[in-house]
Image (spheres, helix red, strand yellow):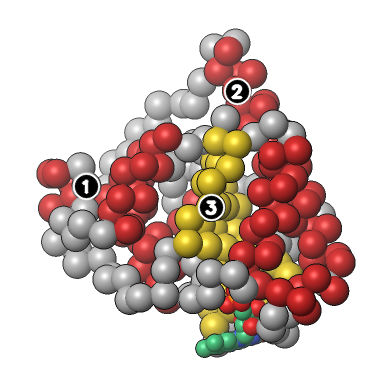
Amino acid sequence: MKVMLVNGSSREHGCTARALQEVAKALEAEGIETETLFIGNRPIADCLACGQCGKLGHCVLQDAAAEFAVRAAEFDGFVFGSPVYYAHPSGRLLSFMDRAFYANGANFRFKPAAAVLSARRAGNTASLDVIMKHFTINEMPVVSSSYWNHVHGNTPAEVEQDLEGLQTMTNLGKNMAWLLKCIQLGKENNVCPPVNRKVYTNFIR
Ligand SMILES: Cc1cc2nc3c(=O)[nH]c(=O)nc-3n(C[C@H](O)[C@H](O)[C@H](O)COP(=O)(O)O)c2cc1C
């Protein structure tokens, strides 16, 4: 089993990376393979709303977000990490997630997911809610921890002092590993995800 950890920070080796590293360590201690993807610090285009992905099966914009969306099929679980910017997640990560989920939502469906935030001081729970909405509109089990999934600090050295924050990350990794193993056992015993009906009415019919 394999989990993809997405680092949505502008800083590859910043506080978000430190938090994700702790989650990855806990997953690997439980025998789960991990891969971390840094989405980079260059602009990522927002969704064009062109609807071409519905026909092509991938985003027309060929970049890291499009590549990730297709590769997501290989993974069993996801952790999305972001710094808090003005009490919301990084806009770059949100564009990345909007496009991946819109173009290739099936590659994420029914797979456990978690959001991880890093903040100097505040805005973390509001940001957590924003990221988690991608999961809860896409039938993904949301993995929680012993506190809301965030660390505090402006630098990785400060995060190092947030012992409860790091403990939350460890517990998150362990909880995700447990859920992944339960799902795997379920599959081996013919307990499979439901086939749900999805009819859009746009509130007008
Ligand atoms: C543009 C910008 C806005 C920020 N807004 C907030 C904020 O609303 N609340 C907060 O606690 N920290 C805020 N911060 C601080 C970062 O969230 C914090 O330093 C975070 O841990 C950085 O993570 P990183 O090292 O992965 O980039 C902001 C930082 C930047 C650059």
The amino acid marked with disc number 3 is Thr
- Residue 20 position (above or below residue 1): below
- Counting other residues with Cα less than 10 Å from the Cα at mark 2, is it few (<14), some (14-19), or many (20 or more)? some
Which residue is painted at 33% across and 76% down in the image?
43
Marker disc for residue 58: 1
Can you name the residue that lies furthest to the top here?
189
In the rendered image, residue 114, in percent from the top left (x then y), is placed at: 60, 52
Relative image position of residue 10 (x, y in whole percent): 49, 76
Instruction: Give the quadrant of residue 82.
Output: bottom right
Alpha-carbon span between mark 2 and mark 1: 27 Å
Q: Is residue 15 visible?
A: yes
Residue bearing mark 3:
36
For marks 2 and 1 on the same chain, the one whose residue lies earlier in the sequence:
1
- Describe the element under mark 2 as helix, strand or loop: helix
Answer with left or right where residue 193 lies relative to residue 154. left
Q: Residue at x 53, y 69 (%)?
A: 12
State the CA–CA distance, disc 3 to disc 2.
Answer: 22 Å
Name the residue tied to disc 2: 184
* Residue at image location 41% in from the left, 75% down from the top: 41
Left or right? Give the position of 162 relative to 30. right
x, y (%) of residue 102? Answer: 30, 53
